[in-house]
Amino acid sequence: MSQGKQSHLKWAILLGITPLLCGCSSAFKRDVTDCFRAKVGVGVGLYAEAEVTSLIQPAVGFGDGSITRMSTVGWDPRPGQPAGMLRTAAFPTLLLGFPFYESPWPESTPEEEFENRKRGLLGALILMGNHYVEGESCSLFGLHEQIPNPLLSQAPSLQQLTPLQRRSRDSWIAISGTLVLLNVDLGVNPLEILDMLGSLLGLDLLSDDERLNGEMITVP
Protein backbone atom coordinates (compact mmCIF):
# COMPACT_ATOMS: atom_id res chain seq x y z
CA MET A 1 0.00 0.00 0.00
CA SER A 2 1.38 3.40 -0.97
CA GLN A 3 2.13 6.05 1.62
CA GLY A 4 -0.71 8.20 0.31
CA LYS A 5 -3.26 5.40 0.67
CA GLN A 6 -1.99 4.62 4.17
CA SER A 7 -2.48 8.28 5.14
CA HIS A 8 -6.04 8.25 3.76
CA LEU A 9 -6.78 5.02 5.64
CA LYS A 10 -5.57 6.53 8.93
CA TRP A 11 -7.80 9.58 8.44
CA ALA A 12 -10.75 7.35 7.56
CA ILE A 13 -10.28 5.33 10.75
CA LEU A 14 -9.93 8.49 12.83
CA LEU A 15 -13.04 10.05 11.30
CA GLY A 16 -14.93 6.81 11.85
CA ILE A 17 -13.94 6.46 15.50
CA THR A 18 -14.48 10.09 16.52
CA PRO A 19 -18.29 10.08 16.20
CA LEU A 20 -18.40 6.75 18.06
CA LEU A 21 -16.44 8.15 20.99
CA CYS A 22 -18.43 11.38 21.02
CA GLY A 23 -21.65 9.42 21.16
CA CYS A 24 -20.55 7.07 23.93
CA SER A 25 -22.11 7.25 27.36
CA SER A 26 -20.38 8.99 30.24
CA ALA A 27 -20.00 5.56 31.90
CA PHE A 28 -17.97 4.31 28.93
CA LYS A 29 -15.81 7.43 28.97
CA ARG A 30 -15.11 6.89 32.66
CA ASP A 31 -14.25 3.26 31.92
CA VAL A 32 -11.71 4.47 29.36
CA THR A 33 -10.03 6.75 31.89
CA ASP A 34 -9.98 3.92 34.45
CA CYS A 35 -7.63 1.92 32.21
CA PHE A 36 -4.55 4.10 32.47
CA ARG A 37 -2.60 6.12 34.97
CA ALA A 38 0.22 8.53 34.25
CA LYS A 39 1.76 10.94 36.73
CA VAL A 40 4.89 13.06 36.76
CA GLY A 41 5.82 15.15 39.74
CA VAL A 42 8.33 16.39 42.24
CA GLY A 43 9.55 13.95 44.82
CA VAL A 44 12.76 13.19 46.65
CA GLY A 45 14.66 9.93 46.89
CA LEU A 46 16.02 6.97 44.98
CA TYR A 47 13.46 4.23 44.43
CA ALA A 48 12.06 2.02 41.66
CA GLU A 49 9.07 -0.32 41.66
CA ALA A 50 7.57 -2.61 39.01
CA GLU A 51 4.05 -4.00 39.24
CA VAL A 52 2.60 -6.96 37.36
CA THR A 53 -0.56 -7.16 39.42
CA SER A 54 -0.17 -7.16 43.19
CA LEU A 55 1.35 -10.66 43.01
CA ILE A 56 4.60 -9.50 41.42
CA GLN A 57 5.54 -6.06 42.72
CA PRO A 58 9.25 -5.82 43.54
CA ALA A 59 10.91 -2.66 44.84
CA VAL A 60 14.56 -1.63 44.87
CA GLY A 61 16.42 1.44 46.07
CA PHE A 62 16.30 3.24 49.37
CA GLY A 63 13.13 5.29 49.57
CA ASP A 64 11.18 8.19 48.16
CA GLY A 65 8.50 10.61 49.19
CA SER A 66 6.36 13.59 48.30
CA ILE A 67 4.17 15.75 50.48
CA THR A 68 1.05 16.32 48.44
CA ARG A 69 -0.66 15.89 45.11
CA MET A 70 -0.24 19.59 44.46
CA SER A 71 3.24 19.00 43.02
CA THR A 72 2.01 16.34 40.57
CA VAL A 73 0.52 16.53 37.10
CA GLY A 74 -1.34 13.57 35.65
CA TRP A 75 -4.15 11.10 36.09
CA ASP A 76 -4.63 8.42 38.74
CA PRO A 77 -7.97 6.57 38.62
CA ARG A 78 -7.31 4.19 41.51
CA PRO A 79 -10.23 4.36 43.97
CA GLY A 80 -9.33 5.30 47.51
CA GLN A 81 -5.79 6.39 46.65
CA PRO A 82 -4.64 8.71 49.48
CA ALA A 83 -2.66 11.88 48.81
CA GLY A 84 1.09 11.95 49.32
CA MET A 85 3.76 9.28 49.09
CA LEU A 86 6.34 7.73 51.38
CA ARG A 87 7.99 4.44 50.39
CA THR A 88 11.04 2.45 51.43
CA ALA A 89 12.74 -0.59 49.86
CA ALA A 90 14.45 -3.43 51.73
CA PHE A 91 16.92 -4.08 48.89
CA PRO A 92 19.82 -3.31 48.99
CA THR A 93 19.84 -1.75 52.47
CA LEU A 94 18.81 -4.80 54.49
CA LEU A 95 20.77 -7.18 52.28
CA LEU A 96 23.96 -5.46 53.35
CA GLY A 97 22.97 -4.39 56.83
CA PHE A 98 20.77 -7.19 58.15
CA PRO A 99 23.34 -8.24 60.81
CA PHE A 100 22.82 -4.83 62.39
CA TYR A 101 19.10 -4.64 61.70
CA GLU A 102 16.98 -3.50 64.63
CA SER A 103 13.47 -4.43 63.59
CA PRO A 104 10.24 -2.98 64.97
CA TRP A 105 9.08 -6.43 66.07
CA PRO A 106 9.17 -6.91 69.84
CA GLU A 107 12.22 -8.78 70.99
CA SER A 108 13.19 -10.00 74.42
CA THR A 109 15.65 -12.83 73.84
CA PRO A 110 18.70 -13.33 71.60
CA GLU A 111 16.78 -16.01 69.70
CA GLU A 112 13.98 -13.61 68.88
CA GLU A 113 16.48 -10.94 67.88
CA PHE A 114 18.12 -13.40 65.49
CA GLU A 115 14.74 -14.29 63.99
CA ASN A 116 13.97 -10.63 63.42
CA ARG A 117 17.26 -10.15 61.60
CA LYS A 118 16.38 -13.11 59.40
CA ARG A 119 13.13 -11.31 58.60
CA GLY A 120 15.13 -8.30 57.52
CA LEU A 121 17.26 -10.44 55.21
CA LEU A 122 14.15 -12.13 53.78
CA GLY A 123 12.63 -8.72 53.11
CA ALA A 124 15.64 -7.82 51.01
CA LEU A 125 15.65 -11.14 49.11
CA ILE A 126 11.97 -10.85 48.13
CA LEU A 127 12.49 -7.20 47.11
CA MET A 128 9.97 -5.95 49.64
CA GLY A 129 8.69 -2.38 49.53
CA ASN A 130 6.70 -0.51 52.17
CA HIS A 131 4.08 2.12 51.30
CA TYR A 132 3.54 4.14 54.47
CA VAL A 133 0.80 6.46 53.19
CA GLU A 134 -1.31 3.57 51.88
CA GLY A 135 -0.30 1.34 54.79
CA GLU A 136 0.56 -1.57 52.50
CA SER A 137 3.61 -3.59 51.46
CA CYS A 138 4.62 -5.25 48.19
CA SER A 139 7.13 -7.87 47.06
CA LEU A 140 7.73 -10.78 44.73
CA PHE A 141 4.89 -13.33 44.78
CA GLY A 142 3.19 -11.73 47.77
CA LEU A 143 5.78 -13.15 50.16
CA HIS A 144 5.69 -9.98 52.26
CA GLU A 145 2.50 -11.34 53.81
CA GLN A 146 4.71 -13.81 55.70
CA ILE A 147 6.63 -10.95 57.35
CA PRO A 148 4.08 -8.14 57.78
CA ASN A 149 5.43 -4.74 58.74
CA PRO A 150 3.84 -3.80 62.12
CA LEU A 151 4.46 -0.11 61.41
CA LEU A 152 1.92 -0.14 58.58
CA SER A 153 -1.78 0.49 59.06
CA GLN A 154 -3.98 0.47 55.96
CA ALA A 155 -5.41 3.86 55.05
CA PRO A 156 -9.14 4.22 55.91
CA SER A 157 -9.96 5.06 52.28
CA LEU A 158 -8.53 1.70 51.20
CA GLN A 159 -10.36 -0.19 53.94
CA GLN A 160 -13.64 1.03 52.47
CA LEU A 161 -13.04 -0.42 48.99
CA THR A 162 -15.50 -2.99 47.71
CA PRO A 163 -14.15 -6.42 46.67
CA LEU A 164 -14.42 -5.43 42.99
CA GLN A 165 -12.61 -2.14 43.61
CA ARG A 166 -9.90 -4.05 45.43
CA ARG A 167 -9.60 -6.49 42.54
CA SER A 168 -9.22 -3.58 40.13
CA ARG A 169 -6.59 -1.97 42.33
CA ASP A 170 -4.62 -5.22 42.43
CA SER A 171 -4.64 -5.66 38.63
CA TRP A 172 -2.28 -2.92 37.46
CA ILE A 173 0.77 -3.39 35.26
CA ALA A 174 2.90 -0.39 36.09
CA ILE A 175 6.27 1.13 36.81
CA SER A 176 7.01 3.94 39.21
CA GLY A 177 9.96 5.50 40.89
CA THR A 178 11.89 8.56 41.92
CA LEU A 179 15.29 9.66 40.66
CA VAL A 180 16.56 12.33 43.03
CA LEU A 181 13.78 14.92 42.53
CA LEU A 182 11.74 13.51 39.63
CA ASN A 183 8.88 11.11 40.34
CA VAL A 184 7.16 9.10 37.58
CA ASP A 185 4.23 6.65 37.73
CA LEU A 186 2.91 4.94 34.56
CA GLY A 187 0.48 2.04 34.33
CA VAL A 188 -2.25 0.18 32.47
CA ASN A 189 -4.98 -2.00 33.95
CA PRO A 190 -6.01 -5.06 31.84
CA LEU A 191 -9.04 -5.74 34.03
CA GLU A 192 -10.32 -2.21 33.49
CA ILE A 193 -9.75 -2.62 29.75
CA LEU A 194 -12.03 -5.68 29.81
CA ASP A 195 -14.57 -3.63 31.76
CA MET A 196 -14.33 -0.88 29.13
CA LEU A 197 -14.88 -3.34 26.28
CA GLY A 198 -17.76 -4.92 28.16
CA SER A 199 -19.45 -1.54 28.48
CA LEU A 200 -19.68 -1.38 24.68
CA LEU A 201 -21.95 -4.44 24.96
CA GLY A 202 -23.93 -2.95 27.79
CA LEU A 203 -22.09 -4.92 30.49
CA ASP A 204 -20.70 -3.50 33.72
CA LEU A 205 -18.21 -6.17 34.77
CA LEU A 206 -16.81 -4.21 37.72
CA SER A 207 -20.09 -2.56 38.77
CA ASP A 208 -18.43 0.85 38.65
CA ASP A 209 -20.51 2.76 36.13
CA GLU A 210 -22.32 4.66 38.87
CA ARG A 211 -19.21 6.00 40.56
CA LEU A 212 -16.57 8.54 39.69
CA ASN A 213 -13.36 6.86 40.82
CA GLY A 214 -10.70 9.21 39.53
CA GLU A 215 -9.80 12.84 39.41
CA MET A 216 -7.43 14.95 37.39
CA ILE A 217 -4.34 16.04 39.29
CA THR A 218 -3.02 19.36 38.11
CA VAL A 219 -0.76 22.09 39.27
CA PRO A 220 -2.94 24.89 40.73
Image (spheres, rainbow, N blue to C red):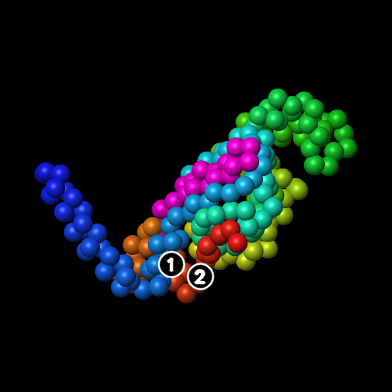
Closest to the observer, 164 or 135: 135
Residue 28: quarter of image: bottom left
Q: Residue at x 51, y 60 (%)?
A: 77
Q: Is residue 215 above or below residue 66?
A: below
* Of residues 72 and 159, the one drawn nearer to the viewer in this rendering: 72
**11 horizontally vs 64: left or right:** left
Q: Position of residue 54 (x, y in %)?
A: 53, 48
User: Residue visible at 74% across and 28% down?
Assistant: 98
Residue underneath mark 2: 212
Image position of 3 (left or right of 28):
left
Q: Is residue 122 left or right of residue 140?
A: right
Image location of residue 53, percent across then percent down: 49, 48
Asked whether 181 or 188 is in front, the reply is 181
Q: Which residues are magenta?
A: 169-192
Quarter of the image for the C terminus: give it. Answer: bottom right
Give the residue at mark 1. Answer: 30
Left or right: 4, with 124 as reference point = left
Identity of the amino acid at label 1? Arg
